Image (spheres, grey):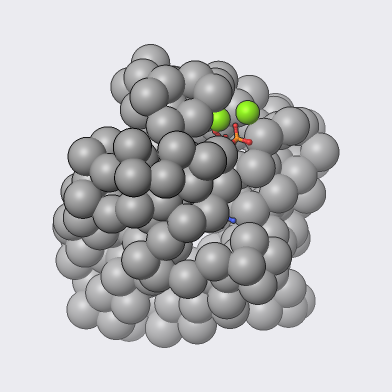
Amino acid sequence: ETVLDAGFFVRWMTAAAAVIDREADRLTELDSPIGDADHGRNMQRGFAAVVTALEAEPPATPGAALTAAGRKLISSVGGASGPLYGTLLRRAGKAFGEAPQVSAEELRTGLGAGVEAVAQLGGSAPGDKTMLDALVPGIEALATSFDAAAAASEKGALATVPMLARKGRASYLGERSIGHQDPGATSSALLLAALAEVAK
Ligand code: ADP
Ligand code: MG
Ligand code: MG
C-alpha cells in the first residue's frame, strides 16, 4: 500500500505551484468573463508563498505540511480562493494529526473533511459552479486511484460550463454566467493533476 510522508506533501505543493505557474494566464482568462480576472495571479501568489514557506521550514509530518500550506494561502491571497483553498488544506492537515505518514485512504478522508469545510465556509454545494464541482468528484475518485481523481476533477471542471453560478462573483452575472468554465473548478483540477503526477 502507498504510504505518504511529509516529503510527498512538499512535492505535491511544489508540483502544484509549477502547474499553476504554467496555467496562470488561462486561469485569469477564465476569471475574466465571469469574475475579476485575478484567479491566475491569486493562485500564483499563494502557491509561490506556500513553496517558500515549506522550504524555509521543512515540515516533519504530512499534517504539518498541509497545515502550513493552508495557513500560507489564507494569509497571502486576498481573493475568495485563498481562504477556501487554505481551509481545504488546513482541515486535511488537521485530520492527519501528528502521524509521520498517511495512507492513500487517509488522504482521501482528510481531503474529504477539507471539502466539507470549504462547503461550510462558502455556503456552497456541488452544482453551484464553484471549485466544489471539481473537488467533490475528484476526491471521491481517489478511492480508485490518483489518476482517476485527476480525470474526475477535470471532468467536473468541464461540467461547470453549462451551470448557472450561485456563489462567488460569477453569481452576480446570473444567467450570463452560463457557458463559461469556472476558474476555481479549473484550478482544483490542476491541484489534483499535480497530486497524480507526484504519486507516479
Ligand atoms: P475572487 O472571486 O475573490 O476574485 P478568485 O478569482 O481567486 O477570487 O477565485 C474565484 C473562484 O473561487 C471561483 O471560480 C469559485 O470556484 C471559487 N469560489 C468563490 N466563491 C465560492 C464559494 N462561496 N464556495 C466555493 N467556491 C467559491
Ligand atoms: Mg477573481
Ligand atoms: Mg478578486
At 27% across and 37% down in the image, what residue appears? 180
Relative placement, left or right, of 188 versus 123 is left
Is residue 94 visible in the rendered structure shown here? Answer: yes
Where in the figure is residue 168, as x and y percent of width and height?
Answer: 56, 47
Residue in the image at 54% along x and 23% along y = 36
Q: Residue at x 45, y 38 (%)?
A: 173
**Nearer to us in this view, 165 or 43:** 165
**Image location (x, y in percent) of residue 12:** 47, 47
Image-quarter location of ligand 2: top right
Q: In this picture, is 77 found above or below 2?
A: above
Q: Give the residue at x 47% y 71%.
A: 125
Is 102 on the left or on the right of 108, as rendered? right
Q: Quadrant of the N terminus?
A: bottom left
Residue 62 percent coordinates (x, y):
63, 64
Q: Quadrant of the C terminus?
A: bottom left
Point out residue 169 in the picture as x, y percentages from the top left corner: 55, 39
> Up-down: is 164 above or below 119?
above
Task: Give the quadrant of residue 96.
Answer: bottom right
Q: Is residue 123 above or below residue 67?
A: below
